[in-house]
């Protein structure tokens, strides 16, 4: 299963104005790398930007030297991806939908330089309270493996330890939003999360992403701190802005910081996907979001905590171009602090 589609700047790579000749991609890429390298040199070593996934043909001339199919990039695109000066981590989303074969993990590892960490998503088989199946009679029924640490270890941690250990950044444990019209039992969630995190091996890092604002309370903060687990400051349809989340779950409460930029609050996946594809230009820059991210990174870096910022195409239109703008904003914020 290949990575799922993700994310567009009116000033960079305007759609409809570029040649599709391979040499034009290569020339544009060389210029983009040179510009990005200047910004990257001013970033603290522990700050890592990356995209939520990588298999996007529209990134030719931005990340990739030539046009390739989505399937080819999903299989072999990481080598070129990791050459970009500002792309120093990457999200692995496909693990949310099904376990990744050992052979695929080895193929990913073979394409990456040493010390290049990736942030893989925990499987929905353990983070969804209802059956995550695609359809059928089981859909909507209680998930017997919800918050099952043994299932998480077997399906994810063990294969990653065997074939991908050098490249394991924080595992992102994303909990889907509650179903419309159904109240959340906050105390039950916190108790279950506490037991789940307490049963996980401590030789990996973990970051929890929630999509219900009501969970961002004292109990949640306490559980994360108890287990040395980070909160994911997400930018998503029905969550408050990352800066607001940072007032409720302080940045200094974890050994590392994770930010995931997915969708502008109030927008939804299908609408943004159709609006932004082929993800080769910024369509909807969000200055407020960029300022929030720069502020979070600036608060994390004095303590030399690792920072991972993962960007989806659907945040502004093109994840790599958003990352360039964010990196510039972070450099400016650090110089001003």
Image (tube, rainbow, N blue to C red):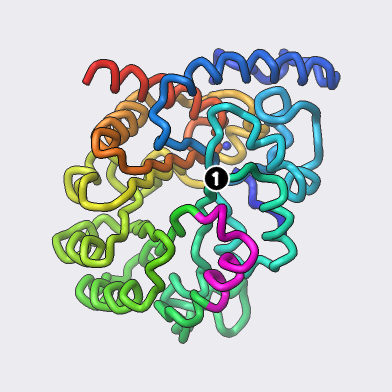
Q: Is residue 95 magenta?
A: no
Is residue 226 positioned above or below 319 on the image?
below
* Left or right: 79, with 7 as reference point: right
Query: Which x, y percent locates residue 177?
Result: 38, 62
Q: As rendered, which of 28 and 115 lies closer to the eye?
A: 115
Query: Which x, y percent locates residue 294?
Result: 32, 29
Badge 1: few (under 14), some or many (20 or more) residues near its Cα, within 10 Å?
few
* Left or right: 114, with 213 as reference point: right
Q: Which residue is mark 1?
A: 115
Question: Quadrant location of residue 228?
Answer: bottom left
Query: At x 21% / y 46%, what residue is drawn?
Result: 252
- Is residue 235 visible in the rendered image? The answer is no
Q: Is residue 162 magenta?
A: yes
Q: Quadrant of the C terminus?
A: top left
Q: As rendered, which of 159 and 190 lies closer to the eye?
A: 159
Query: At x 48% / y 18%, what residue is drawn?
Result: 39
Helix, strand or loop under label 1: loop
- Is residue 222 visible in the rendered image? The answer is yes
Query: Which x, y percent locates residue 288?
Result: 31, 27
Query: Which x, y percent locates residue 35?
Result: 57, 14
Q: Quadrant of the N terminus?
A: bottom right
* Left or right: 89, with 291 as reference point: right
User: What's drawn in magenta, residue-wise?
Assistant: 154-168
Secondary structure mostly taken by the magenta-highlighted segment of the chain: helix
Is residue 172 positioned above or below 18 on the image?
below
Question: Quadrant location of residue 281?
Answer: top right
- Name of the residue lying farthest toward the left: 218
């Amino acid at each position: 299963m290949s990575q799922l589609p993700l994310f567009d700047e009116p000033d960079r790579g305007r759609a409809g104005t570029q040649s599709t000749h391979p040499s034009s991609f290569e020339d544009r890429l060389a210029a983009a790398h040179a510009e990005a390298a200047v910004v990257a040199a001013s970033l603290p070593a522990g700050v890592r930007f990356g995209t939520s996934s990588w298999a996007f043909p529209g990134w030719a001339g931005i990340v990739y030297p030539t046009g390739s199919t989505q399937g080819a990039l999903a299989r072999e695109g990481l080598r070129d991806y990791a050459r970009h000066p500002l792309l120093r981590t990457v999200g692995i989303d496909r693990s949310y939908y099904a376990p990744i074969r050992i052979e695929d993990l080895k193929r990913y590892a073979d394409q990456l330089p040493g010390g290049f960490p990736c942030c893989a998503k925990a499987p929905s088989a353990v983070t969804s309270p209802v059956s995550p199946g695609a359809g059928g009679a089981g859909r909507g029924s209680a998930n017997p493996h919800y918050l099952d640490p043994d299932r998480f270890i077997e399906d994810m941690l063990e294969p990653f330890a065997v074939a991908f250990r050098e490249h394991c950044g924080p595992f992102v444990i994303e909990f889907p939003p509650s179903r419309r019209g159904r109240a959340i039992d906050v105390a039950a969630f916190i108790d279950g999360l506490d037991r789940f995190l307490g049963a996980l091996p401590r030789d990996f890092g973990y970051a929890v992403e929630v999509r219900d604002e009501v969970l961002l309370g004292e109990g949640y903060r306490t559980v994360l701190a108890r287990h040395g687990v980070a909160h994911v400051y997400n930018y998503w349809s029905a969550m408050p802005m990352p800066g607001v989340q940072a007032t409720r779950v302080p940045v200094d409460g974890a050994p590392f910081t994770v930010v995931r930029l997915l969708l502008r609050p109030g927008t939804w996946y299908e609408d943004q996907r159709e609006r932004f594809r082929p993800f080769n230009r910024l369509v909807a820059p969000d200055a407020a979001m960029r300022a929030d991210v720069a502020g979070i990174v600036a608060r994390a870096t004095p303590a030399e905590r690792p920072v991972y910022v993962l960007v989806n195409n659907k945040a502004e239109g093109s994840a790599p171009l958003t990352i360039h703008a964010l990196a510039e904003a972070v450099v400016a914020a650090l110089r001003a602090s």
